[in-house]
Image (spheres, rainbow, N blue to C red):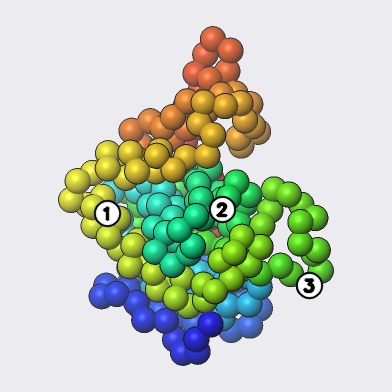
Amino acid sequence: MRDGAPQFPPLLSGLAVGSGVDPFAKAVSQAMLGCDSGLVTYEEPGAELSWALVLAPEAPLREAMSMVLAAGVAMSDALGALGPPETAVHLEWPGTLRVNGARVGEIRAAASPRAPAADAGWLVIGLRIALAPRTDRAPGLDPDRTTFVEEGCGEIGGMPLLESWSRHMLVWINRWLDEGTQPLHRDWTGRAHRFGEEATVMGQSGTRLGLDEHGGLLLRQGSETRLLALSDMLELS
């Protein structure tokens, strides 16, 4: 893992947070103060790496929430570029990141306003990745959770990962602006974790069928199909 601040692509800028400061909470506070879009808040990597991106989508929130899917696809692209070729990366709706079947990270989101039909004034997308086992957790204790080290990706440094993700994220943001949601949703669906199987999502049980035009999950419950919106994952800000 190399030293030094991460190098971000044009249109993105970095802000390191101090020890004990949550980058997601910092990004939300900066967004509320009116910071520029493209700010990336991040922590120094340890056993985990967390960061967040501030966006000003200029679109209804229900459409802008596709950036959650973009964040997942960008992480998959980054791991594909940096990790061993046999590493299998899958995305579980709405924001779980999996490597070789086990949970390795998560995506969070906050926005204002929170009404799906309203134009999003700002949107914050946060990520957390488990790089190495914590000292208080024995490896393999929870088979549904893993880390980069346990999956043979221990050579990936936190800062190179953040840099790679930011580049891929910017590519997907530009594709979304130029081409709409279809390419993004198609790519995300190709990496989806166990679509067509039974699951409990946001307290609702059913069969995961696919995504709607705004990235919401179609969940079949008996003879009916229920829509779970991506905006349902928004955290209070």
The single residue placed furthest to the top in the displayed view is: 223
* CB under 8 Å between discs 1 and 2: no
What crowding class fits label 2: few (fewer than 14 Cα within 10 Å), some (14-19), or many (20 or more)? many
Q: Earlier in the sequence, mark 3 or mark 1?
A: 1
Label whose residue precedes the other's in the sequence (3 or 2): 2
3D distance between C-alphas at marks 3 and 2: 21 Å
Instruction: Report helix, strand or loop for mark 1.
Output: loop
Residue type at numbered disc 1: Glu
Secondary structure of the residue carrying numbered label 3: loop
Crowdedness of circle 3 by 10 Å Cα count: few (<14), some, many (20+)?
few
Disc 2 is placed on an element classified as strand
The relative height of residue 184 versus residue 7 in the rendered view (above or below) is above
Q: Amino acid at mark 2?
A: Val
**Residue at position x 42%, y 81% in the image:** 6
Q: Is residue 135 left or right of residue 15?
A: right
Q: Which mark is residue 135?
A: 3
Give the CA distance from mark 3 to mark 1.
43 Å
Residue type pointed to by label 3: Thr
Question: Which mark is on residue 58?
Answer: 1
Q: Nearer the viewer, residue 167 or 95?
A: 167
Q: Quadrant of residue 221?
A: top right
Residue 26 seen from this side: no
Percent coordinates x, y for residue 177 in the rendering: 22, 52
Asked whether the beta carbons under mark 3 and mark 2 sit within 8 Å of each other, the answer is: no
- Mark 2, residue position: 99
Can you tell which of label 1 and label 2 is closer to the viewer? 2
Q: Left or right: where does residue 12 sit relative to residue 96? A: left
Query: Where residue 115 is drawn, which disc sits there?
Result: none
The quadrant holding residue 184 is: top left
Please say if 207 is above or below 106: above
Residue drawn at x 35%, y 61% as measured from the top left: 169
Q: Is residue 32 left or right of residue 186?
A: right
